[in-house]
Image: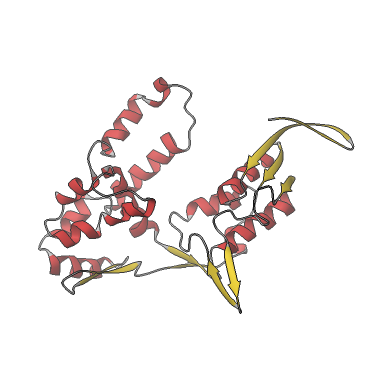
Amino acid sequence: MGSDVEAGGRDARPHAVVVGAGFGGMSAAARLACCGYNVTCVEKHATPGGRCTEIVREGHRFDVGPSIILVPSAYFEAFASIGDDLNNHVELMRVDPTYTIRFYDGTKLELTGDLQRMETQLESMETGSFKRWGEETCADISYGHDNLHMTLENIAHRNFYSLFEFFSPLNAFLLHKLKVLRKHYNYISQVFKDSRLRSAFSFQDMYIGVSPYDAPATFSLLQYTEFCDGVWYCRGGLYKISQALAKVLQSRVTCVWKLNMS
């Protein structure tokens, strides 16, 4: 960071350079601009969006990067930070059932927000599994909500400048609650005896390229976000959100774009 010199003289505002105009980069640029920074956003591609872009062929639109949304609140917060509302620009639709898992023996499981439907499915596969799923995993609303939001507030959304700051009594308590030292598949195995259910509630770790046998049990939070926050689709493709944020950023705050910087 530093000060920026332009034709009219020296800009007294501190200058911040954001590398990458993906959704995260644009969100950071928006927040910095609202805090009084003169922001330059550098992107190697010709348009903002980063990995979240699209290909259009013969009137058909294809998402190149992500195609669904987890934790939609993060997207709403980005727009709210510059005084706008995501709903003013795009239409989000909840995907329910989220997906259908088909097993080797011909049976299937649909992950849905309908608790009665979930109970019927789980109990048909393993007696008592629905109750244990609710009590022992992050699908339990209060447990999952508290763990997720306490983690975001006290760890993910904070800067730590020393190990002593990170390993506070509260964070040590959170890390214990999140079962960071247990493997996810091992943890799920205490909830379900049926191998199909063990797989169904641990394969989500592979979203980020980690094996359930190696991932910490903390990743159970993925099931909480899918079940309680839902999985969402943006009509017209996720690139519409990147386009909307770029448009709002250009109209509401001062941000210099430098595209095609590869």
- Judged left or right of residue 2, residue 99 is left
Q: Is residue 173 visible?
A: yes
Q: Is residue 182 left or right of residue 40?
A: left
The picture places residue 260, in percent across and down from the top left corner, at 69, 51
Does 14 appear above or below 140?
A: above
Q: Residue at x 30, y 34 (%)?
A: 175
Query: Which residue is depicted at the point 22% across and 55% down?
Result: 134
- Counting labels gives 0
Image location (x, y in percent) of residue 108: 22, 71
Foreground residue among 39 and 248: 39
Q: Residue furthest bottom?
A: 58
Q: Residue furthest front?
A: 262
- Is 243 drawn above or below residue 149 in the view shown? below
- Out of 90 and 1, give the one closest to the viewer: 1
- Residue drawn 38% across the image and 39% down it: 150
Q: Is residue 179 above or below residue 189?
A: above
Asked whether residue 224 is in view, the answer is no
Question: Residue 225 appears at what percent x and percent y?
Answer: 37, 54
Residue 128 image-quadrant placement? bottom left
User: Looking at the figure, which quarter contains the N terminus?
Assistant: top right
Image x and y of residue 43, in percent: 65, 48
Of 231 and 106, nearer the camera is 106
Q: Is residue 39 left or right of residue 97?
A: right
Where residue 53 sits, quadrant-wise, is bottom right
Which quarter of the figure has residue 88? bottom right
